[in-house]
Amino acid sequence: LTFKTYFMPVGAVVMILLLFAINDVVGAYAQSVNQGAQISNTIEAVAVGSGEFGVTHGSGTIFSISAEIRDGQGRVWISIDETIQGTMWQAAAQRAAYIAAQVTEVDLSNRDAFFSVAPSPQYADQDLSNIDGPSAGAAMTVLLISQILQIPLNDQVLMTGTIRSDGRVGPVGGVVEKAETAGKHGADIFLVPVGAGMVGGMPLTDVVGSKYGMEIIEVYHIMDVLPYYFS
């Protein structure tokens, strides 16, 4: 992998199995590319709106992100539902594609990545005008890695977190509201950036997760995230 200096805190056995899985399916992906196959996938993400100066407000919501890889020139495209007016989705998509290519060691220079963002049907009546892209960056990265490697995603996992240029999961706001939304949505596991798993000196799992039987887990790097989604 590209991240040579990163010491992954997840269990060594899990990571070894994951790396074997990545090596096995990269070959299958390369064959599918040669045959012109198109693979589509979707991930759900959780968000809250942000007002002036990025202050979070309102209840959380769930929206769907889909991705597709086609023959192209290494470009990244994103289509956003008209009800979502954030301005940073393109930057999040670009970063997600970059990290996905680094993690999988698959050359996407002759492929284009297409993302599409829309509200999940049961949340379509909520105001999504202040929902923006950065906090879904890590989820978008997981989605594209899943598509490249043809590994299905565990739909009982939700997460929030930006994605940094070295693959680390970055901080976000509104984590308590997002945890409540994830729990109500039925998630078994909610992944949050390091430092976001505590509120008022108490574990967020105790404050929010226990009401829904949901475990809230801090993740440092995108490689920490994959075992949960690929389980």
Image (cartoon, rainbow, N blue to C red):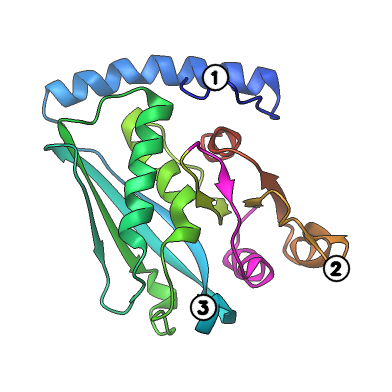
- Front label number (1 vs 2): 1
Cβ–Cβ below 8 Å for labels 2 and 3? no
Question: At 15% from the left edge and 39% from the top edge, which residue is drawn?
Answer: 70
State the CA–CA distance, disc 1 to disc 2.
36 Å
Q: Amino acid at mark 2?
A: Gly
Q: CA distance from mark 2 to mark 3?
A: 22 Å
Q: Is residue 195 above or below residue 186?
A: above
Read off the residue under disc 2: 200
Segment colored magenta:
166-188
184 vs 86, nearest the viewer: 86
Ranked by sequence position, the earlier of labels 2 and 3 is 3
Label drawn at residue 4: 1
Q: Residue extending furthest front?
A: 53
Of the 4 image quadrants, the one containing the C terminus is: top right
Q: Position of residue 115 (x, y in %)?
A: 27, 53
- In the rendered image, residue 147, in percent from the top left (x then y), is placed at 33, 37
Residue 30 lies left or right of residue 2; in this view the side is: left
Q: Secondary structure at mark 1?
A: loop
Upstream in sequence: badge 1 or badge 3: 1
Query: Mark 1 or mark 2: which comes first in sequence?
Result: 1
Seen at 64% across and 23% down, the residue is: 14
Mark 1 → mark 3, Cα distance in angstroms: 36 Å
Q: Residue at x 56, y 54 (%)?
A: 159
